[in-house]
Image: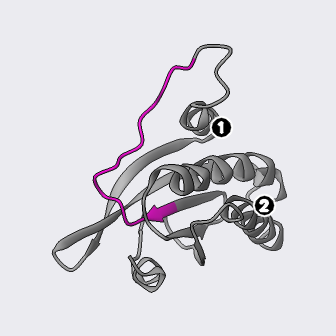
Amino acid sequence: MRSTMLASCRFTRDFGPQESYQLATPATLSAPRLSRDFIASVLDATGHPSLIHNARICVSDLVTNVVQHARGSAVAMEIGVGVARVVVAVLDAEPNRRPFLRFPRSDDERGRGLMLVKSLASDSGVTPVWEGLSIVGKAVWFELRDGSGQQ
């Protein structure tokens, strides 16, 4: 897998006028931190500071899943910022390795990522990423809504 391939794929979720931001990074141990910092910067710069905390948690969990479970060398993130909501997609090149919701025991140290995303986000899901007629990856996405209505 090439990181340029992921960067060229477009995850689209039509929810009206939006600004779009992208990050592509190697799928290394530093990717979650870079992704958390990137989403925080985008949301601060676009007038959505109330969403930063939940977005950082969701992004961190999704990017960590890619680093730990998707066997690719890159991870990409696309952010669509609208007037009162933000959609974030974390993309990888493993279309057949779909995330699944786990129900960990209270003493388990792992397995809560998707539960956190589902509890913090307004909506979330998994969508295939297409290049032409081929599925080349997946986008695990979530939507956060901002009651302030600022852009």
Q: Nearer the viewer, mark 2 or mark 1?
A: 1
Which residue is at a point 74% across and 52% down the rendered structure image? 56
Which residue is at a point 49% across and 54% down the rendered structure image? 141
Residue 24, percent from left and from top: 57, 77
Q: Residue furthest left?
A: 133
In the image, residue 145 above or below residue 117? below
Query: First in sequence: mark 2 or mark 1?
Result: 2
Q: Left or right? Give the position of 57 relative to 8.
A: right
Using a 10 Å C-alpha cutoff, classify the residue at mark 1 as few (fewer than 14 neighbours), some (14 to 19) or many (20 or more): some
Which residue is at a point 81% across and 73% down the rendered structure image? 45
Disc number placed over residue 120 in the picture, else none: 1
Residue 20, percent from left and from top: 58, 77
Q: CA distance from mark 2 to mark 1?
A: 15 Å
Using a 10 Å C-alpha cutoff, classify the residue at mark 2 as few (fewer than 14 neighbours), some (14 to 19) or many (20 or more): many
Q: Left or right? Give the position of 147 relative to 6.
A: right
Residue 127, percent from left and from top: 35, 55
Q: Which residues are magenta?
A: 90-104
Circle 1: element type:
helix
| Quarter of the figure with the N terminus | bottom left
Disc number placed over residue 48 in the picture, else none: 2
